[in-house]
Amino acid sequence: MKTEKVSETWLSYQKEIADDNYYFARSCIRQNVLPAAEELFLKILKTELGKNVFDDPRQTTCTGIAYHSGIIPMETTMTVVARQFALMNEAGYENFVCSCVTSFGIYSEVMETWKHFPETLTKTKELLKKATGKDFIPPKNLVHTSDVIYKFRKEISEKAKFKLHNKTTGEPLKVIEHIGCHYAKIFPDKGIGGAEYPYVLAGLIDEWGGIRVDYPERRHCCGFGFRQYLIKANRGYSVANTKKKFDSMKPYNPDLIITNCPGCNFFMDRWQYVISEMTGTSYDDKGYGIPVLTYEELAGLMLGYNPWDIGLQVHQVDVVPLLNKMKYPFDIKKKYQGLNEKDLGKPKNTRLLSCC
Amino acid sequence: MKNLYEKLTEDIRFTEGLSACINCGTCTAICPAAQFYDYDPRNIVNIVQSRNNNEIEALLKSDMIWMCGECLSCKTRCPRNNVPGYVIQALRALSIETGLFIESEKGRQQLALKRTIGEHILKYGYCVYFDEINTDMYPEQGPVWEWMRENATDILERLGANYKGDGAGTLRKICQESLNDLQKIFDVTGATERFEKIEKYSEQKAQELGVSYGKGTSDDYFKMVYNGEHTSK
């Protein structure tokens, strides 16, 4: 009986994640700054896990960045979201998986608003019909891409060729996880583990053999702040918030950071470069910085994929020190090559060290 | 013109975001913006719930309402289920609606957001797009990004993207039908009207400040608001 009570208590921290047949909604930021990440997600789902995912060319931005920057009304975002759902309906799907935490927050907020203020659903339907002639039904299941990787973490583990181990020391790798504010701070019941015990990325670290690092500013914002980053004059806000996190995590000597949100990944990678250029500070002890990967990039490494085929060379902080710790096989000559081994030169050097 | 508090109550985010604030300050304690700006969401909510028209008008003219980063940490933590971040969203919308956003340095930045993120949506179907992200405007992108831009076609092909291609895939060209849908949605839901207001009021301010005003990202007014260059007025 006691066990049942405990389960009931923790039920609110669980989340339903559909098993198959997903309509895939892309991320604006990820497609630009990590152009291999979404293709990797699709590859893992389709070829490793045998799932059906529909990648619709007609989808567009959800407008989330514009919405949170205050330049478009809520009605606009609601109607664009409604159009995405109409496309999902037309394609014959009910399970919506989006590839961006900002989008996940937007879709969740819009669906909650329709639920609590039904007149807004009626109005959105009218506006969508007027603009596009379309009607829509909201999805039965709304999840983030990392939720799906989390759901199948054990299946990925069974196929894995690597673990999160430092093969030189024999110790597990120390991994920072950053889930992003809009994953569970807005609607805690929509995230695995809620806002208090978020487990969507921690569960991957546990399953794949690493050690989670707890540090004082673990749940602090990455510093995006929408208009605070997007306007150059405000960018000090962004780097200052990221620096606060890095100063807090440094004493724990993390080997790796994994992120949930496209923006968070970008800021935790690029601001390390900027802080290094401005102050000479590196947050590892060798001067390379701490590599910042996404959840599917980490899954790709566990599965033994060629790091240069899954885009790990486009992070500003070099991933080679991490690969070396894992004794991960790679051909350094191919890091910056194009197709058919075409020579594309290499990026300029920075104060933050690069391995090649 | 209606009382400003009444105008705020027409925004669903305001009614959802403010029920009864007890001024405990939890929102300010958790707020990332409050740690780096002279910013206090507790005080903003306190001013708004005073319903004092003059004080609300002063808020709409101030830098204060533009300092929030929309992380919404305040939503998680407020013990009375208020959401200062939603109240801020409603204040920002009203500041643009009334044209008062041009009275503050940070409010004037809305023009740059409209001309980048806003126009990218209608031009590309993405909030941000590869071709527009250069290291002059975004120097933190760094040398790896510069290398990617110099070798865009080759590296994006290597990584499996469908850069500017038809059909599905990463960085695909969004079809004209979808772009038309976005434009029509913007027209019927008030986004086009908001864009026009941002331009109209910004042009007025540029004239008042004696700063040249054009289109795109190269006129002096855009550079002023984007880079934070100060004028004598």
Image (cartoon, rainbow, N blue to C red):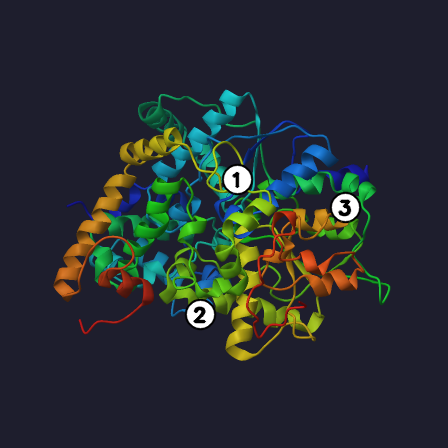
User: Which residue is painted at 35% across and 25% down in the image?
Assistant: A132
Which of the two discs, 2 and 3, sits closer to the camera? 3
The residue tagged 3 is: A303
Check disc 3 and give the amino acid type: Leu
Q: How crowded is mark 1: few (under 14 residues within 10 Å), some or many (20 or more)?
A: some
Residue at the limit of the structure toward the right, as seen here? A170
* Whether residue B20 is visible: no
The residue tagged 2 is: B36
* Whether residue A314 is visible: yes
Distance of label 2 from label 1 (alpha carbons): 40 Å
Query: Which element type, helix, strand or loop, lies under badge 1?
Result: loop
Judged left or right of residue B38, residue B59 is left
Tally of numbered tags? 3
User: Do marks 2 and 3 share a subunit?
Assistant: no
Name the chain under label 1.
B
The residue tagged 1 is: B162
User: Which residue is painted at 34% across and 31% down in the image?
Assistant: B180
Query: Which element type, helix, strand or loop, lies under badge 3?
Result: loop
Query: Which element type, helix, strand or loop, lies under badge 2?
Result: helix
Instruction: Where is residue A197? Give x, y as percent.
Output: 66, 51
Judged left or right of residue B190, residue B120 is right
Which of the two discs, 3 and 1, sits closer to the camera? 1
Q: Which of marks 2 and 1 is nearer the N terminus?
A: 2
